[in-house]
Structures are given as C-alpha cells and as structure tokens.
Image: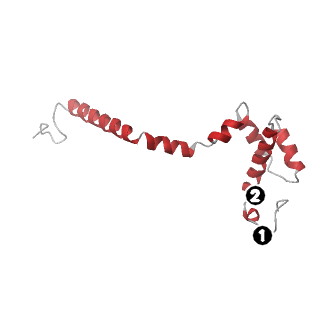
C-alpha cells in the first residue's frame, strides 16, 4: 500500500517492482530539484523518510545511472531513447532505402564478377 492514495486507486494495482522504480525515480527527482547529490545513500534515506521500502538494488542502479549525468537533459530529451531511435529511422528512411538498394546492387555485381560473369546455373549473365 502506498501512502497518500485512496483505497482502490490505480496505484494499488501496480506491481512491487513498479512501485520500487517509481519511488526511486521520485526520490531522484526530489534530490535533483533540491540541488542535492544523487547517491544511493541519499536515495535510500529519502525513500525511507517517506515510509516506503524498496529492494536494495534500486537506489544503487539509479545512483550509478545518474552519476556524472545532467538530469535536466534526461528530463527534456528522455532517458530511454527508444522512441527517438524509431523517429530517427523514419526520418532517414528514404535516403537509407536508396543507400541500401545501391549496396545490394554492388553486392550482386561483385558476386557476378566472382563467378566469371555466369549465374549459378552456369549460364552467362544476360541470357
């Protein structure tokens, strides 16, 4: 049960893992907002102060992930990059397709040269 939420709220239906991840995320954001260093110890202290309990590895993972990183850049640009990767692929789709087709043609030409101008059945190309 999470503190501060009504019984039968949507937060009651999350898994323990989701709860732990959210707790550590909110603790990291609170530390960042307070200009405090984000360490595993600071995360644990803040999480415990809110009456929550998380698996011991969560604060360590988050502290290491955020170590030497600009949290504001993660907030603006997102941390996972999954969506951005898909968008980048869509943007370069036309150019990437042409380059890929050109590469295929080059490979076919090289393959034909290796076989002495004959296809795989021994007939000369073009017949």
Say left or right for 4 vs 71. Answer: right
Residue bearing mark 2 = 16
Q: Earlier in the sequence, mark 1 or mark 2?
A: 1
Image spot of residue 122 (x, y percent): 14, 39
Image spot of residue 92 (x, y percent): 42, 39
Give the numbered dot on residue 8: 1
Q: Which residue is at the far bottom?
A: 8
The residue that appears at 76% across and 55% down in the rendered structure is: 19
The residue that appears at 63% across and 42% down in the rendered structure is: 78
Image spot of residue 120 (x, y percent): 19, 40
Quadrant of the image occupied by residue 61: top right
Say left or right for 25 vs 81. Answer: right
Say left or right for 60 vs 92. Answer: right
The residue that appears at 75% across and 51% down in the rendered structure is: 22
Q: Is residue 105 above or below residue 82?
A: above
Give the numbered dot on residue 120: none
- In the structure shown, which secondary structural element does the residue marked by tag 1 occupy? loop
Q: Nearer the viewer, mark 1 or mark 2?
A: 1
Q: Nearer the viewer, residue 124 or 28?
A: 28
Q: Nearer the viewer, residue 49 or 73?
A: 73
Q: Which quarter shows the N terminus?
A: bottom right
- In the structure shown, which secondary structural element does the residue marked by tag 2 occupy? helix
Badge 1 local density, few (<14 within 10 Å), some, or many (20+)? few
Q: Which residue is at the far left?
A: 127
């Amino acid at each position: 049960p999470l503190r501060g939420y009504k019984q039968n709220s949507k937060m009651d239906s999350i898994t323990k893992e989701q709860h732990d991840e959210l707790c550590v995320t909110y603790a990291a954001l609170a530390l960042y907002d307070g200009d405090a260093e984000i360490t595993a110890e600071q995360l644990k202290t803040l999480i415990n102060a809110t009456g929550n309990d998380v698996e011991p590895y969560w604060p360590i993972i988050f502290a290491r992930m955020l170590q030497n990183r600009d949290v504001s850049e993660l907030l603006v640009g997102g941390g996972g990059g999954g969506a951005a990767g898909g968008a980048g692929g869509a943007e370069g789709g036309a150019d990437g397709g042409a380059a890929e087709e050109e590469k295929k043609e080059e490979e076919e030409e090289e393959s034909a040269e290796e076989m002495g101008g004959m296809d795989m059945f021994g007939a000369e190309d073009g017949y």
